[in-house]
């Protein structure tokens, strides 16, 4: 019988032996062992726990470019701005302890081209960001195989769910059942101290306590022991080390006392220690997992196939649509959305009418009607009707996928204050062990009983248990998870926990105007008619253009003179549409034109218009000039409609102590007018995207800055700010680069996000205060002998639950 040097499995027959005489069960184990040693990863074997020495045998598979692409192409996402930067989501099968995570992180991080790596200990999901110019997909997969693990596609729909395992329920039931029964035995023993019990009866009762205490100590509490061993392997003292030492010390001391015939045993204390500590852990885990699950509910919206037709020159008929994998749909392809189906790709409706439900994305309960030329956002559920739409992105670039990635990656990054708490907790463990020893030595030397009646051993155990830094470790993560889960229900998505802390510390908030403070919905605010003209000519000309200004003028004329509808655009001839400037045509033999001031002045048949139109200083967002028969006959001033609640939201932000300013590409006079109307003290107009970003960076020299925007022209500013906040209806790419997304496009949700961030940071500080004050008060009391081990366990669990309950306050409205 041989034992494999790598997987530690027993095997018979001929062994595979390397040059150093090490025996292996197969060439695979030999090769993995040799690779780890050659790369300097031999420390991996020393980090493994004793009960986890039997590793899975290495996979014999090997990926080439074709096989890797066919299996993992759906999980490979490319950065639209940098096509060579790829993100891979893969499930690493075989991970079962911290040593496995350590090895995978070491190996993959050393691979050239790997830019970022995160591995989840709960789901074994790895997120690898790499440059495919330096390393290929198959290289990453083969490296995972080379170190003894098996990469598999990670299915977002069927991936790991954050639900409590049945094992935890079973462990808790065992602990509760044994605790309830052992208390009856303990009552008999305590009453016997006053009424008298024979020595034989006491021994029987002690043995009964021993039997009842053993299942909780060795079954229920085994989760603490495994965690403690992992920490000790890494030369760390975690809270589970203190708990494990406390439980086992009480139990084995009681075994010794029972066998030596002592009248004082602590089996009941050991059992109750396990019960109360594990009950606290159970409730903490339940609250944490429930909060975390709220962040992953978006993944349930994914479907694998849609009805699609590849891009062609005409709109296809319904019979031409065939089922297609959602990852194969590209921008420009046609997609059919029918009743009961959910849109997976962003697009623009080409034909048909439907009523779509966006409640799963933005919380809006009222279905919205869509028809030709309307935008369709991925995630919308078709409640009634059907439409054919043209995809404006791939699935990887869709709003739904970017939103899902924001949520699924939210738990990877940690807030700075959480890192500080973890550092304190790691050093705290060593200090407590020292205090435990000091207490034991003092009470032993004093040779007297403590105030609680416990001996030196009991005092030491009380110190060890009561000082467990559970509350300190929970202070930040539970609060951030609850906060992000509550925000998601309110249709506010935070990129990660760091954003909450940064947002809470911001002093300045800068707004883009169009699409953020306003609806990006131009309307005619006033008109000037210099000469009489045929309104039908203007309606026909404005309707022939797709420019937002022309469409706004057409809607205004149509609404004003309803008798003109329906009209015939057939009256127009010689139409010339100059993109972004204007349009010319002939209407019933008359030359007409419409567009900007510069366009009208550039017309060859315009001799003189008197004063330059470009010098006009009217405080409108846009202007539209109309020429009829070589004469300027009308000018229309257009304004942008402000969002409902914008003024009230600005007022609330200023009450919170934030400095509010506005950045706009519009003329300064327009920006100033809107700013005055909204109560914004500072505004900057006529800014291009680069100038917005430069202004943000200038502001950051003295304060933390939030930027709120919606469009492509805001991307640089969003990325430059300490926190970038995007409106959900904005450009998909702006959503991808933002730290916070407001799915409902309501500025009231922006106020909520800021309040939630500030309240979360306040709750975190309260949690840290609770945990630190608890330890500052309880440790001296325990060292003084005022607290027995049982009350120490209850107190420790209570402090942790207090932190959890305080964090759950974030579920309410800030």
Image: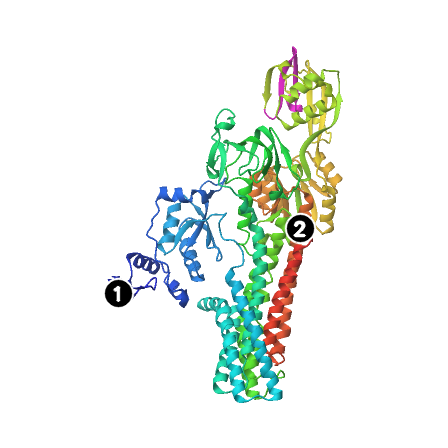
Marks 1 and 2 close (CB-CB < 8 Å): no
Q: Is residue 800 shown left or right of residue 231?
A: right
Residue 596 lies within the magenta run: yes
Position of 369 relative to 20 (above/below):
above
Q: Residues within 10 Å of mark 1 (few under 14, many from 20)?
A: few
Decide which of tag 1 and tag 2 comes sooner along the chain.
1
Q: Which residue is drawn at the image coordinates 58% and 66% (left, top)?
A: 280
Q: Nearer the viewer, residue 56 or 557?
A: 56
Q: Residues within 10 Å of mark 2 (few under 14, many from 20)?
A: some
Tell me residue 93's x, y (percent): 41, 54
**Whole-percent x, y for residue 310 in the image:** 47, 30
Query: How did the renderer colour the structure?
Result: rainbow
Report the quarter where the N terminus lies. bottom left
Mark 1 vs mark 2: give the one in front.
1
Q: Secondary structure at mark 1?
A: loop
* Mark number, residue 279: none
| Disc number placed over residue 754 in the picture, else none | 2
Assess whether residue 738 is covered by the magenta stretch.
no
- Where residue 404 sits in the image (x, y, percent)? 54, 46
**Image: 34 above or below 219:** above
Q: Which residues are magenta?
A: 579-599
Residue 673 at what x, y percent from top left? Answer: 74, 36
Count of marks placed on residues: 2
Query: Between 323 and 93, which is closer to the camera in this rendering?
Result: 323
Q: Is residue 654 visible?
A: yes
Examine the rendered structure and indicate whether residue 466 appears above or below residue 729.
Answer: below
Disc 2 secondary structure class: helix
Mark drawn on residue 21: 1
Could you tell me if residue 694 is visible in this image? no
Q: Residue drawn at (51%, 71%), measured in percent from left and top? A: 216
Furthest-left residue in this view? 14
């Amino acid at each position: 019988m041989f034992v494999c040097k790598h997987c530690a499995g027993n095997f018979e027959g001929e062994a595979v032996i390397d040059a150093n005489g090490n025996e292996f069960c197969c060439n695979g184990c030999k090769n993995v062992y040799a690779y780890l040693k050659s790369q300097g990863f031999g420390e991996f074997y020393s980090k493994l726990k004793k009960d986890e020495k039997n590793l899975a045998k290495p996979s014999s598979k090997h990926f080439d470019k074709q096989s890797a692409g066919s299996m993992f192409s759906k999980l490979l996402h490319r950065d639209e701005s940098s096509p060579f930067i790829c993100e891979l989501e893969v499930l690493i099968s075989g991970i079962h302890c911290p040593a496995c995570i350590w090895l995978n992180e070491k190996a993959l991080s050393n691979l050239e081209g790997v830019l970022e790596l995160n591995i989840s200990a709960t789901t074994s999901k790895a997120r690898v960001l790499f440059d495919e110019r330096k390393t290929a997909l198959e290289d990453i997969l083969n490296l995972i195989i080379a170190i003894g693990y098996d990469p598999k596609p990670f299915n977002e729909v069927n991936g790991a769910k954050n639900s409590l395992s049945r094992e935890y329920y079973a462990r808790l039931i065992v602990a509760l059942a044994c605790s309830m029964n052992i208390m009856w035995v303990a009552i008999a023993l305590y009453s016997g101290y006053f009424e008298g019990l024979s020595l034989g009866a006491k021994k029987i009762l002690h043995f009964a306590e021993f039997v009842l205490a053993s299942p909780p100590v060795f079954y229920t509490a085994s989760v603490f022991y495994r965690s403690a061993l992992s920490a000790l392997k890494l030369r760390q003292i975690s809270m589970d080390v203190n708990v494990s030492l406390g439980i086992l010390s009480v139990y084995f001391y009681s075994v010794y006392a029972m066998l030596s015939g002592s009248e004082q045993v602590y089996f009941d204390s050991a059992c109750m220690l396990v019960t109360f500590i594990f009950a606290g852990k159970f409730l903490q885990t339940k609250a944490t997992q429930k909060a975390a699950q709220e962040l992953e509910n978006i993944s349930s919206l994914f479907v694998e196939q849609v009805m699609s037709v590849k891009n062609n020159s005409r709109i296809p008929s319904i019979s031409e649509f065939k089922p297609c994998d959602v990852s194969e749909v590209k921008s420009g392809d046609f997609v059919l959305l029918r009743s009961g189906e959910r849109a997976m790709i962003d697009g623009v409706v080409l034909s048909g009418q439907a009523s779509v439900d966006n409640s799963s994305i933005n919380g809006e309960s009222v279905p919205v009607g869509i028809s030709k030329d309307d935008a369709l956002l991925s995630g919308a559920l078709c409640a009634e009707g059907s439409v054919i739409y043209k995809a404006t992105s791939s699935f990887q670039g869709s709003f739904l996928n970017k939103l899902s990635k924001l949520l699924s990656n939210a738990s990877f990054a940690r807030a700075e204050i959480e890192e500080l708490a973890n550092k304190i907790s790691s050093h705290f463990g060593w200090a407590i062990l020292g205090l435990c020893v000091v207490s034991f030595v003092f009470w032993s030397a004093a040779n007297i009983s403590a105030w609680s009646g416990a001996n030196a051993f009991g005092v030491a155990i009380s110190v060890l248990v009561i000082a467990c830094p559970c509350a300190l470790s929970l202070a930040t993560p539970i609060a951030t998870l609850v906060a992000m889960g509550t925000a998601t229900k309110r249709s506010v998505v935070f990129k990660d926990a760091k954003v909450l802390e940064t947002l809470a510390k911001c002093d300045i908030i800068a707004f883009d105007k169009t699409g953020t403070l306003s609806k990006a919905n131009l309307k005619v605010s006033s008109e000037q008619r210099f000469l009489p003209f045929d309104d039908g000519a203007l309606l026909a000309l404005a309707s022939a253009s797709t420019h937002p200004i022309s469409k706004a003028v057409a809607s205004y004329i149509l609404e004003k003179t309803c008798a003109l509808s329906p009209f015939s655009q057939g009256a127009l001839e010689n139409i010339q549409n100059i993109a972004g400037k204007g349009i010319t045509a002939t209407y019933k033999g008359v030359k007409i034109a419409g567009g900007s001031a510069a366009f009208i002045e550039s017309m060859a048949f315009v001799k003189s218009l008197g004063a330059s139109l470009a010098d006009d200083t009217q405080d409108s967002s846009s202007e539209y000039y109309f020429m009829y028969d070589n004469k300027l006959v009308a000018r229309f001033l257009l304004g942008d409609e402000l969002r409902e609640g914008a003024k009230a939201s600005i007022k609330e932000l200023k009450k919170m102590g934030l400095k509010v300013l506005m950045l706009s590409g519009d003329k300064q006079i327009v920006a100033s007018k809107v700013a005055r109307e909204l109560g914004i003290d500072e505004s900057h107009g006529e800014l291009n995207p680069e100038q917005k970003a430069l202004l943000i960076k200038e502001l950051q020299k003295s304060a933390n800055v939030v930027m709120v925007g919606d469009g492509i022209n805001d991307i640089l500013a969003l990325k430059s700010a300490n926190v970038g906040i995007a409106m959900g209806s904005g450009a998909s790419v702006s959503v991808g680069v933002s730290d916070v997304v407001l799915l409902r496009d309501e500025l009231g949700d922006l106020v909520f996000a800021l309040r939630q961030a500030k309240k979360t940071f306040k709750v975190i500080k309260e949690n840290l205060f609770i945990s630190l004050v608890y330890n500052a008060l309880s440790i001296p009391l325990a060292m003084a002998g005022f607290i027995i081990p049982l009350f120490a366990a209850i107190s420790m669990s209570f402090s942790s639950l207090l932190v959890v309950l305080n964090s759950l306050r974030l579920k309410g409205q800030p």
